[in-house]
Amino acid sequence: MDKLIISILIMLPAIISCRTAAEYKRPDEFPVISYNNLETEKFNIKISAAAENGEEWVYHPIMVVQEYRSITDTRFASIVMKHDRGEAPLNSRVTVVEEGYLDDSVRGQWLKFYLECESSEAPWKINEIRQAYLCGRMGFPEEFSKELCP
């Protein structure tokens, strides 16, 4: 009997960790089924003014995204940037996924920024921002949607 209890106690952490690993899926792997388009005109005016003032953040896509919306301190944050080419890109997409909000209904958020610039010396402008939410209530599917969670 003692050997059985000891065996179970030794194996229990392995059993628990296997189950957790099998059930866990990263939030940036959840599908985006719908999204809202956010307004960009006012922020692009801010970018132009900052470029005239010599501010450096306007020349780096991730810094532009960070200036638009601070990445919060959450349980999970993923930032992925894809350029149209390796050197002197003219188009960039930055995807930000956050999960772990301390909110009763909204568990996380997905944002995708489409940016462009005229040349490597020009500031970046935002063409489009897409936004979706991840619901945190039990029974909701693990997918991002434009609908605010109830």
Image: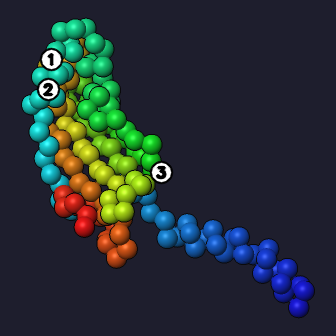
Q: Residues within 10 Å of mark 2 (few under 14, many from 20)?
A: some
Work out whether residue 82 can be spotted.
no
Amino acid type, callout 1: Ser
Q: CA distance from mark 2 to mark 1?
A: 6 Å
Q: Residues within 10 Å of mark 3 (few under 14, many from 20)?
A: few
Question: Is the N terminus in the top left, top right, bottom left or bottom right quadrant?
Answer: bottom right
The image position of residue 124, as x and y in percent, is: 20, 23
Q: CA distance from mark 2 to mark 3?
A: 30 Å
* Label 3 SS: loop
Amino acid type, callout 2: Asn
Q: Along the horizontal axis of the image, is 71 left or right of 33?
A: right
Q: Which mark is residue 75?
A: 3
Q: In the image, what residue occupies the spot 9% across and 31% down? A: 41
Q: Which mark is residue 44?
A: 2
Residue 112: quadrant of the picture: top left
Question: Is the C terminus in the top left, top right, bottom left or bottom right quadrant?
Answer: bottom left
Q: Which mark is residue 48?
A: 1
Q: Is residue 128 above or below residue 41?
A: below
Q: Along the horizontal axis of the image, is 21 left or right of 132?
A: right
Amino acid type, callout 3: Arg
Q: Nearer the viewer, residue 74 or 11?
A: 74
Work out whether residue 18 can be spotted.
yes
The image position of residue 22, as x and y in percent, is: 52, 70
Q: In the image, what residue occupies the spot 18% across and 21% down? A: 47
Q: Residues within 10 Å of mark 1 (few under 14, many from 20)?
A: some
